[in-house]
């Protein structure tokens, strides 16, 4: 660490590792945080794993809605496994170092999976739109082939763009500190370490945010605008309640995930606060994946019944 003070301009290619400061500003709570995050990780793996299992084995759940839900749960498991294990290791060992390659790899997969989640949430909203607004055409429109194509498109679409964003970020000139004031290698704290002009990089980030957060979010709002309008026209209160119940779980997940993501990535570099960014990041990296199984099981009678069959 000391020799870096004598190097006014150190290109990133000459660095071999970074240090993730994480929650080092509260040293007396390290083991407590380890316990909390470890418990959350177990809940995420168990809860989302159970959703995948019940949607595979229960014939009543062999529908497009639960096909997308199973894929979303699998995505959540992958998503949290990019950040939480490293964070837990840092809290346990207090070493906090992360190699250049590991940091770039973590960021790249985090961006790819984050973009996939945004697109998949939009696909799930479209599924609810077709089911409620065009129920007679639903089996034809949302056939198995279309469902697979929509899921595959969600996974594949962002890969080249996110790899390009990662490459651009790690091509920046860096000097001074190599301490990342975050618990994983996210773009905003990496930008803060750059000593060159990051304007072009910030603009490319905003374009990605528009493509993978803003556009899907607007599509979701448009879909649910149509859905709510259709639901309100249903003749019976029972029908309206049942239709709302199939959408409310998804809307809660959307609000938590997109809300925290938009606030984090739409700010210019000068406006970022390390403490606030870490807090917001906890929402889309831990809170949403942890509450996803609870939201979808507690508010969904079909999944609850399937779980009771599976766990007598």
Image: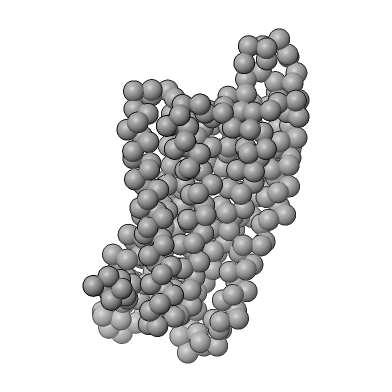
- Residue 264 locus on image (x, y percent): 52, 41
Q: What residue is at 48 percent from the left and 77 percent from the top? A: 64
Q: What residue is at 59 percent from the left and 75 percent from the top? A: 148
Q: Nearer the viewer, residue 240 or 115?
A: 115
Instruction: Give the answer, above or below, for where 64 lies relative to 271.
Output: below
Position of the C terminus, as image quadrant, is: bottom left
Farthest residue toward the front? 93
Instruction: Give the answer, above or below, for where 59 lies relative to 166.
Output: below
240 to the left or right of 104: left
- Residue 224 locus on image (x, y percent): 45, 68
- Looking at the image, can residue 280 be seen? no
Farthest residue toward the left? 312
- Looking at the image, can residue 34 be seen? yes
Residue 143 occupies which quadrant of the picture?
Answer: bottom right
Position of the N terminus, as image quadrant, is: top right
Instruction: Give the answer, above or below, for where 5 lies relative to 42.
Output: above
- Residue 142 locus on image (x, y percent): 54, 81
- Residue 97 locus on image (x, y percent): 56, 28
Q: Nearer the viewer, residue 60 or 188?
A: 60
Residue 50 occupies which quadrant of the picture?
Answer: bottom left
Instruction: Give the answer, above or below, for where 108 lies relative to 30.
Output: below
């Amino acid at each position: 660490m000391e020799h870096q003070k004598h190097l006014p301009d150190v290109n990133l290619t000459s660095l071999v590792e970074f240090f993730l400061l994480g929650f080092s500003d509260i040293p007396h709570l390290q083991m407590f945080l380890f316990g909390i995050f470890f418990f959350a990780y177990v809940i995420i793996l168990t809860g989302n794993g159970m959703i995948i299992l019940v949607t595979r084995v229960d014939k009543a759940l062999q529908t497009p809605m639960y096909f997308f839900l199973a894929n979303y749960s699998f995505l959540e498991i992958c998503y949290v496994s990019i950040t939480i294990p490293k964070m837990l290791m840092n809290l346990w060992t207090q070493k906090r170092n992360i190699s250049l390659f590991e940091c770039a790899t973590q960021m790249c997969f985090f961006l790819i999976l984050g973009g996939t989640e945004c697109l998949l949430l939009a696909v799930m909203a479209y599924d609810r739109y077709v089911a409620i607004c065009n129920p007679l055409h639903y089996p034809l429109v949302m056939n198995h082939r279309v469902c697979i194509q929509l899921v595959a498109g969600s996974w594949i679409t962002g890969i080249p763009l996110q790899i390009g964003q990662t490459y651009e970020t790690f091509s920046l000139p860096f000097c001074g500190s190599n301490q990342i004031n975050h618990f994983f290698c996210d773009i905003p704290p990496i930008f803060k370490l750059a000593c060159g002009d990051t304007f072009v990089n910030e603009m490319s980030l905003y374009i990605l945010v528009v493509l993978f957060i803003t556009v899907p979010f607007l599509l979701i709002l448009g879909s649910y605008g149509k859905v709510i309008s259709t639901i309100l026209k249903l003749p019976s209160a029972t029908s309206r309640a049942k239709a709302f119940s199939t959408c409310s779980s998804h809307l809660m997940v959307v609000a938590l995930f997109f809300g925290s993501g938009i606030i984090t990535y739409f700010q210019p570099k000068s406006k970022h606060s390390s403490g606030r960014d870490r807090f917001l990041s906890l929402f889309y990296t831990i809170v949403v994946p942890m509450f996803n199984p609870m939201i979808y099981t507690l508010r969904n009678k079909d999944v609850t019944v399937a779980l009771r069959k599976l766990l007598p």
